[in-house]
Amino acid sequence: MSTVIMMFLWCLRQKNRDEKVRLSSSSGGIFSAISKFVLDNGGTVYGAAFNDNFEVTHIGAENLAAVDKLKGSKYVQSDLGGVFVDVKRQISNDRYVLFTGTPCQVAGLKAYLGDKNYDKLILVDLVCAGTPSPLVWEKYVELLQIKNDSKLDKFSFRDKRLGWANSSSYARFKNGQELFNDYLLDSYRSIFSGHFASRPSCHSCVFTNFKRISDITIADFWGIEKYKPEFDDNKGVSLLLINTNKGKLIFEAINNNIEYEVSNVQEAVQRNLIMPTKVSPKRKLFWDKFSKHGYKFVAKKYTTYGLKNRIKQKVLKPILVKLGILNAKR
């Protein structure tokens, strides 16, 4: 770990004391706790949400119902629109503002605001593996709606009904139909995990280290079952890096609403806190096939939506693992 640059003040594992909040969050519910502090102090919370067309955009929220739209992972590049202008207007009026986004979005806001220090601006960034193209997401949503003969009504990338470690995509349509653990439904998350559609800049990201750009960094605390099994109830645990004195003050203001323990860099380290996501060797071919044939074709070719891939995953892989030819984690 000698090559890791550590600039944070505290490293913590955390979970919200409100189980309902935690189950509706991607990991431990720390975003909700910080958001509540900001709302209780008359502020505005900015983050990524689905609009009525299920495009991902950054919006401002001024009540808990609106904040609910910001909760949960959004594995799509979000449209920031005029949010930076709105943030500056709010903090210039001496209001609390929480801005949550990818590290590059946080860096963009800081560049826009300049060198002036705003005491009531709280910046939270995510440990990010890269953001896929909105076009791939758009075509995925179109196909889901065609297949189910209805407009999408609700979507989650990380539904926890089978637990945090086994979360899966969930969709509900306006005709009342629901999908969970469905091959087509899960195909987009597989494309995200395979890094076929990430922006090229994500593969040379300068923010994939412990020298964070925000006051607080949040992520899933993967590996908690190994380091602290008694803290893991499979309902979600957050990794929390406190990067600035302001972040420390915010944490102290909310810590009665959360359960937490001090951790360390060895436990907290994950790939995108060390290096950018590597380019998939299949990326160019993926884009060629997507451009020529559309989403359904690449979903069948690169995910378990395709019968051949399901056979490989469900039949061949267990045999190869048993024979010692393939590692079980691959």
Image: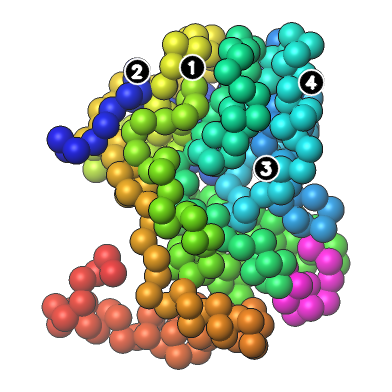
Whole-percent x, y for residue 4 in the image: 24, 36
Residue at image position (54%, 34%) is 107
Secondary structure category for the residue under label 2? loop
The residue to which callout 1 is attached is 247
Among numbered discs 4 and 3, the one appearing first in the sequence: 3
**Which picture quadrant has residue 140?**
bottom right
Residue at image position (60%, 44%) is 72
Q: Nearer the viewer, mark 4 or mark 3?
A: 4
Asked whether, in this view, residue 326 is left or right of residue 243, the answer is: left
Among numbered discs 1 and 3, the one appearing first in the sequence: 3
Q: Does 287 sit above or below residue 23?
A: below
Gap in Å between the C-alphas at discs 2 and 3? 27 Å
Whole-percent x, y for residue 84 in the image: 72, 32
Give the quadrant of the N terminus: top left
Secondary structure category for the residue under label 1? helix
Secondary structure category for the residue under label 4? helix
Q: Are marks 1 and 2 in contact (CB under 8 Å)?
A: yes
Q: Are marks 1 and 4 in contact (CB under 8 Å)?
A: no
The residue to which callout 2 is attached is 9
Among numbered discs 1 and 2, the one appearing first in the sequence: 2
Q: Nearer the viewer, mark 1 or mark 4?
A: 4
**Amino acid type, callout 2:** Leu
The residue to which callout 4 is attached is 89
Q: Report the front residue among 113 and 70.
A: 113
Q: Which residues are magenta?
A: 141-152
**Amino acid type, callout 1:** Gly
Q: Does 212 sit above or below residue 129?
A: above
